[in-house]
Image (spheres, helix red, strand yellow):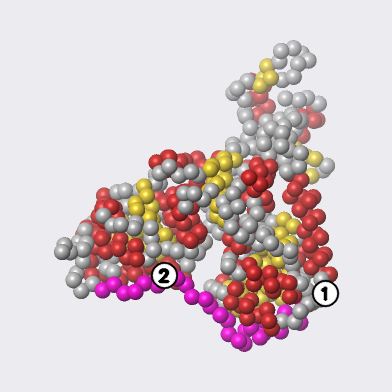
Amino acid sequence: MAKQTVAEQFVDILVRAGVQRLYGVAGDSLNPVIDAIRRTPGIDWVQVRHEEAAAFAAGAEAQLTGSLAACAGSCGPGNVHLINGLYDAHRSMAPVLALAAQIPSSEIGTSYFQETHPDQLFRECSHYSELISNSRQMPRVLQTAVQHTIGRGGVSVVSLPGDVAGETVPERAVEHALVTSRPSVRPGDAEIAELARLVDDAKRVTLFCGSGTAGAHDEVMAFAERVKAPVGHALRGKARSGFRYNNPYEVGMSGLLGYGAAYEATHECDLLILLGTDFPYNAFLPDDVKIVQVDVRPEHLGRRSTLALAVWGDVRETLRCLTPQVRVEKDRKFLDRMLRNYADALEGVVKAYTRKVDKHIPIHPEYVASVLEEEAADDAVFTVDKGMCNVCAARYLTPNGRRRVIGSFSHGSMANALPQAIGAQFLDRKRQVVSMSGDGGFTMLMGDFLTLVQYDLPVKIVLFNNSSLGMVTPRWAWSSWRCSWRACRHMAQATTTRTSPRSPARRAPTGCGWRSPNTCVGRCGTPSRTRGRRSWTSSRTPTRCRSRRRSGRRW
């Protein structure tokens, strides 16, 4: 029987850990591993066009399954390209293992061609990052990396020189049993009792939920019913846990993309309970309310707010222990008031952008999102680009307990939607996967559209094209509106003709064009003022911008 190589042992351990595919871009330093995959049943090599896409795809797969996923990059620039997608996976607590190939081991430290030090480079975006410098380190380093990834939730990186990957494994190399799932963490009795006392002492309790409430929907609903608490959520709490589904206590979302009455509910209560959330925006959290935080990661406790009590444990296990110990609240006044405020906000703000706009040109992005919500399959997976796509998804997509919404919600990267859709679709070719891509993000990794074609993946891509970076443009456009108006005025004069003195202006194809649906429809790329405040027009009917109103002229 032929002896096993390090690359073959590496691949065997991945298969034992549940990895079904390795995303990456081929390179000489990866050849031993790719060849081992070719000869190993149960695992496939997925060739993408950019290593960043490989990391995003692996992260999406890990988020959907909760199981280990993997990606790889060749030495030097190849594995450097992984870093943004790995940052996203790590901050999303997605269990991803990355293989960073390395230059020949004898050349490390000599400024060799394509030399980098990936074991150092990836330290900040991983729980574990180590170099295998000789065959005797296998399989212990890889097994340790797998257990860090699964046990702590996040990324591990193993750097492997190509020459070491081709070496034979020593005869005494021992492979131990792998940990492939995480245990539940139950708080101590003293913490449960103290939390029950704080809840009983408070007249108005609000729950604010994050991604750590995944799998605890029924427990959260039972507790909210018992104490008559409104339930708000962060974006990841909605996307992963689906708290808009079957939730009679929902009051919306807080934060930069917030809507509804979540902000009011968190500020007007006597006790705010943060469940499985590391909500980063201090400005949206109260500083004069008692706060309790429940989280499975102790390093999250108290780093955003001053806590009256910190509870280390799973949300599901904590609420199962807590709910029977608190008294039943009968007064619904606070809850009902927050629910009314939430209903008013939905009707007056969120739904206002989707009423009577079906024939508007350009199409309102909010209307597109609302149609997607109605037409998508009940178990669809949505991948959402950062920026305006995030806004539309946050406000108009409703997870129903079977749908999933994935985005770069913690890292905030552009270009995530298309590669995440690749990972989601590989899991199940029959499941509907919809990528809500912005034009800016899509063009960043547009090459991986070919990956969809190559593997015949039936991903649906909805491209939101506003010809700008929509969340950035309004910030600089307002401060420079005078200059941009003058520039566009001269351009318009050069590209506008009239058929008669009284005929309307007719624009030639080379005009300044649409900058954004959030900019002045006079095509000058500047904001208008309405009722004494800043506003951004998006009607299809040409209107005068502020300066044009003064002169009484139109484009």
Task: Say which label, 1 or 2, has the lower sequence index.
Answer: 2
Q: Secondary structure at mark 1?
A: loop
- Looking at the picture, how far across and down is residue 76, in whole percent? 33, 52
Q: Is 454 located above or below residue 279 in the figure? A: above
Judge by depth and name the residue closer to the eye, 340 or 488.
340
**What is the quadrant of residue 248 in the picture?**
bottom right
Distance of label 1 from label 2 (alpha carbons): 45 Å
Residue lying furthest bottom: 190
- Looking at the picture, how far across and down is residue 537, in whole percent? 73, 38
Seen at 80% across and 59% down, the residue is 341
The amino acid beneath tag 1 is Asp
Q: Which residue is mark 2?
A: 180
Q: Which residues are magenta?
A: 174-202
Residue 166 lies left or right of residue 480; in this view the side is left
Q: Is 159 located above or below residue 507 in the figure? A: below
Crowding at label 2, few (<14), some or many (≥20) Cα neighbours within 10 Å?
some
- Looking at the picture, how far across and down is residue 476, in whole percent? 64, 43
**What is the quadrant of residue 33 in the picture?**
bottom left
Seen at 68% across and 81% down, the residue is 324
Magenta highlight on residue 384: no
Judge by depth and name the residue closer to the eye, 405 or 386.
405
Residue 75 lies left or right of residue 385; in this view the side is left
Q: Is 204 located above or below residue 440 in the figure? A: below
Q: Which residue is mark 1?
A: 331
Magenta highlight on residue 185: yes
